[in-house]
Amino acid sequence: MNDAANNSGPNNNSGPNNRQPKKKKKRKKVKRVDPSVFWGDPEKLPPPSQVDTS
């Protein structure tokens, strides 16, 4: 069987022109959170002596 005959046919997906594109997994967008926003502004935080660490 030569390639031309092998790849012809409506239901044959093996041909180079009939490659079905692979579905890309949709990635969840990771929101980049600014550390200063997440932790609060260091200047606005109470001094370490006032922070309850228990």
Image (tube, helix red, strand yellow):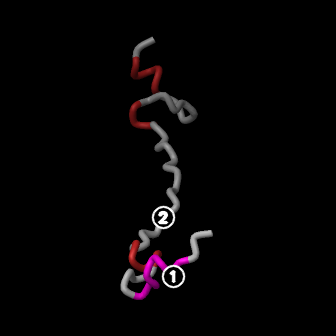
Q: Residue at x 52, y 47 (%)?
A: 23
At label 1, counting other C-alpha atoms closer than 10 Å, the crowd grade (few under 14, some 14-19, many 20 or more) is few
Front residue of this view, candidates 38 and 53: 53
Tell me the quarter of the image containing the C terminus: bottom right
Tell me the quarter of the image containing the N terminus: top left
Which residues fall within the magenta stretch? 44-51
Q: Residue at x 41, y 88 (%)?
A: 44
Q: Amino acid at mark 2?
A: Lys
Q: Residue furthest left?
A: 43
In primary-sequence order, the first of circles 2 and 1 is 2
Quadrant of the image occupied by residue 2: top left
Q: Residue at x 43, y 79 (%)?
A: 37
Residue where numbered disc 2 is placed: 29
Is 15 above or below relative to 52? above
Front residue of this view, candidates 45 and 22: 45
Residue 14 lies, in percent from the top left, at: 49, 28
Quadrant of the image occupied by residue 12: top right
Q: Amino acid at mark 1?
A: Gln
Residue 45 lies, in percent from the top left, at: 44, 84
* Residue 11 on the magenta span: no
Residue 10 lies, in percent from the top left, at: 54, 35
SS for callout 2: loop
Query: Which labelled disc corresponds to residue 39?
Result: none
Front residue of this view, candidates 31 and 47: 47
Quadrant of the image occupied by residue 33: bottom left
Is 20 above or below relative to 46? above
* Residue 49 on the magenta span: yes
Query: Which labelled disc corresponds to residue 50?
Result: 1
Magenta region, main secondary structure: loop
